[in-house]
Amino acid sequence: MSGTRIVLVSERSRAPRAGGSPHPRLRGLLARGYAGFTEPAGPPHDLISPATAGVGIVLKLDDSAWHPPELLIGAHDVCHVHPDAPAHPAMQQWLTWLGAYRLGLPTGAISGQVMDLTDVLGSGVRRLADQLRHTADRRRQSALLDAYLLRRAEDGPRPAPEVVWAWRRLTATGGRLPVGRLADEVGWSHRHLISRFKQQVGLAPKTAARLARFDAVWRRMATHPAPRWDRIADECGYADQAHLIREFHQFAGASPAAFLAGLRTRAALAGPA
């Protein structure tokens, strides 16, 4: 799904990076390993956040006036651009919708929002950020974040099995399964499925299906150095190439070719991860 592969893209070049592997018990709740930037890098740049069903958290490792120190990025169905964002040392993570829900985040209410994470999760996350700032060892930082997320997930709510089933069916079919059929499979009315899905996932089932299809395009882009957009559109269930391009503009803020070219340029500037 888009939350597992489309990341918050930074325009920084040659920024010192850090990473870490989450605890195995967090598998399925987190979209990827821990990531971050260990030092500021250059002047402010645009941050581009393509549409995603994931929920992003950013814990800055220094004090600044730009945004709150602990930042929450809700699931969103359009590309977000955060202009002139300063480059700060930070740890960041993308939660799957399931991880966000299990951590007690109100996934439906935060959809499309960028907000102070402390306002949602309370003072505990502020204490965590303070610990991270005073911990130089990267492994220790990952362990602190592990412990916090595991505690939250252990005590957090569990989603409805019907919503989990609907999600898995949408992603397994690349977004091609009609919502009405999903409702029939789980034994809910069409309206009830949409309501519960939006409350727990943060997006409507139809939007999630479109993102699943978009993710199929993304995966093909990653494995094809010279993609044939008309062929990819057909393989991923779009009506035609123009349909694919319209969706890509909404979800990524550019045409597929332009977005791919931008990613390659940024990768060349940034050098090895």
Image (cartoon, helix red, strand yellow):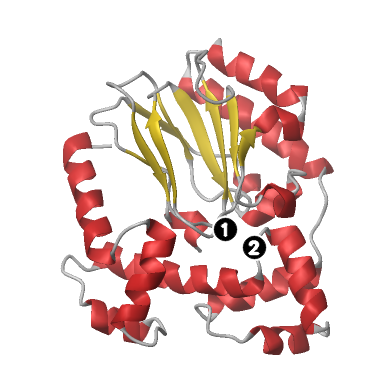
The answer to whether residue 271 of the structure is visible from this angle is: no
Location of residue 191 in the rendering, given as x and y in whole percent from the top left corner: 79, 78
Specify the amino acid type for callout 2.
Answer: Leu
Report the label total: 2
Residue 223 marker: none
Instruction: Locate residue 148 relative to residue 86 in the image: left or right.
Output: right
Contact? badges 2 and 1 (CB < 8 Å): yes
Image point (33%, 86%), residue name: 240
Closest to the observer, 227 or 17: 227
Mark number for residue 53? 1
Q: Secondary structure at mark 1?
A: loop
Front residue of 240/95: it is 240
Q: Which residue is mark 2?
A: 203
Query: How far across and how far down the image is residue 106, in percent?
Result: 75, 48
Kind of element beneath mark 2: loop
What residue type is disc 1 on? Ala
x and y percentages locating residue 68 in the rendered image: 59, 24
| Above or below, comparing residue 110 to residue 173 in the picture | above
Q: Does residue 50 sit above or below 150 in this rendering?
A: below
